Structures are given as structure tokens and as C-alpha cells.
Amino acid sequence: MKSLSNYGFDGLLELMHSQEIDTNDWIIEPIDKERGGMNFVLPNTQGEIYLTWEDLYKVDILFVHTKKNYNEIVSVDTLKVLLATMEEQRQRTVAGIRDMLKENFKSSAEVSQDGKPF
């Protein structure tokens, strides 16, 4: 039998997996607030989400680049939209970093193929 503190965390994982969000790509830590939830860190956002006693999710998110805070109690449908949006932002940031690295190493590889030193 699950303890009440795991209920919110497990629910969040289920929501994320139902949206095909790979939780291995998120830095998450379970928390014991009310019915349970998680702290998380992504390249663009960080914060906590937990299930309240009223079966709604408390969301406290800081958007790193804009320094804006989203601190609300939301329904499951709104939470799904927030999770999907944060995952899309994460994927865009990772893709941008990947492209930047590929471009930098591509330039270095072209120089070395010409026989010129780096």
C-alpha cells in the first residue's frame, strides 16, 4: 500500500509518462508536502509541484531567464499543459546547446581536415 506522501509524486510521474515526458531528462526529488510531490530543476525552470489535500496541485515554478514566478493551485488539466510546456522549453534549450556544440566542433573538424592546426 502506498503512503499518502508518495501519492502525489506517483501521480506526477504518471502524468509525465502519459505525455511521453522522459523523467530521466529531469532532475527530480520527491517531497513530502501534504500528499507528496516533487522538487525539480530544468535548464529554464525550477520549483516544486505537490498534491494538496483538496486533490489539486500546488505549483511553484521560477522561470530562470525571466525571473518570473508562477505560484498557483491548479487542476490536473492545467498541470498537464504546464508540464508539456516545460518539457518543450527543455527540449528547445537542449537542441540549441547541441546545435551550438555541433557548429563549434564542425568548424574545428574542417580546420583539421585542411591540415591546418587548431
Image (tube, rainbow, N blue to C red):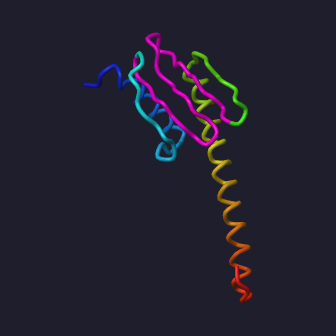
Tell me the chief SS of the magenta region.
strand
- Highlighted range, magenta: 35-64
Drawn side of residue 88 relative to residue 32, left or right: right
Q: Position of residue 22 (x, y in %)?
A: 50, 45
Q: Position of residue 59 (x, y in %)?
A: 56, 22
Query: Residue at left 51%, top 36%?
Result: 16
| Residue 54 included in the magenta stretch of the image | yes
**Quadrant (top left, top right, bottom left, bottom right) of the C terminus:** bottom right
Compared with 105, 52 (above or below) is above
Query: Residue at left 66%, top 55%?
Result: 97
**Name of the residue lying farthest toward the left:** 1
Compared with 68, 56 (above or below) is above
Q: For residue 99, which quarter of the picture? A: bottom right
Q: Nearer the viewer, residue 104 or 98?
A: 104
**Name of the residue lying farthest toward the front:** 117
**Name of the residue lying farthest toward the bottom:** 115
Q: For residue 96, which quarter of the picture? A: bottom right
Drawn side of residue 57 relative to residue 72, left or right: left
Drawn side of residue 86 relative to residue 26, left or right: right
Drawn side of residue 78 relative to residue 5, left or right: right
Query: Residue at left 51%, top 25%?
Result: 49
Q: Nearer the viewer, residue 2 or 107?
A: 107
